[in-house]
Amino acid sequence: MSLVYIEIVKQSYADCEFSAGLVKGHLVDTCYLRLFREGDEVIILLRPDEMAAIAYLCSAVLWSKLLPEKEAVENA
């Protein structure tokens, strides 16, 4: 089975790169998440609902990190 990765979004930093997009040629998984840092690469194939779950989890972590800072500013 030959997979084709169609990159939709990419975020590059000095020592790493994250990207995500669509996959053609796979029967079940239609999205991918690619993590690349210092020569190591991980590509995870995901269904759309799994991709949405990862987005939800990341958003929840960031919100939990920022909420105390927001409350500190409001209570100052």
Image (tube, rainbow, N blue to C red):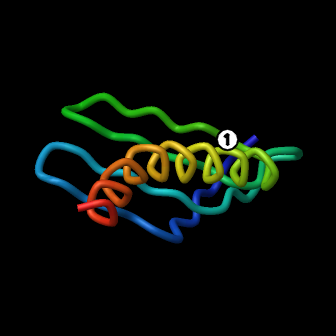
For this view, does 9 lie left or right of residue 4? left
Residue 68: x, y in percent? Answer: 37, 48
Q: Amino acid at mark 1?
A: Leu
User: Residue at the location (38% across, 53% down)?
Assistant: 66
> Camera-side residue: 70 or 4?
70
Q: Quadrant of residue 46?
A: top right
Q: Which residue is mark 1?
A: 45
User: Residue at the location (87% across, 44% down)?
Assistant: 28
Residue 2: x, y in percent? Answer: 69, 46
Q: Which corner quadrant holds the N terminus?
A: top right
Residue 62: x, y in percent? Answer: 44, 49
For this view, does 16 lie left or right of residue 6? left
> Camera-side residue: 23 or 50?
50
Residue 52: x, y in percent? Answer: 72, 54
> Camera-side residue: 51 or 33?
51
Q: Which corner quadrant holds the C terminus?
A: bottom left
Q: Which residue is situated farthest in the bottom direction here?
A: 8
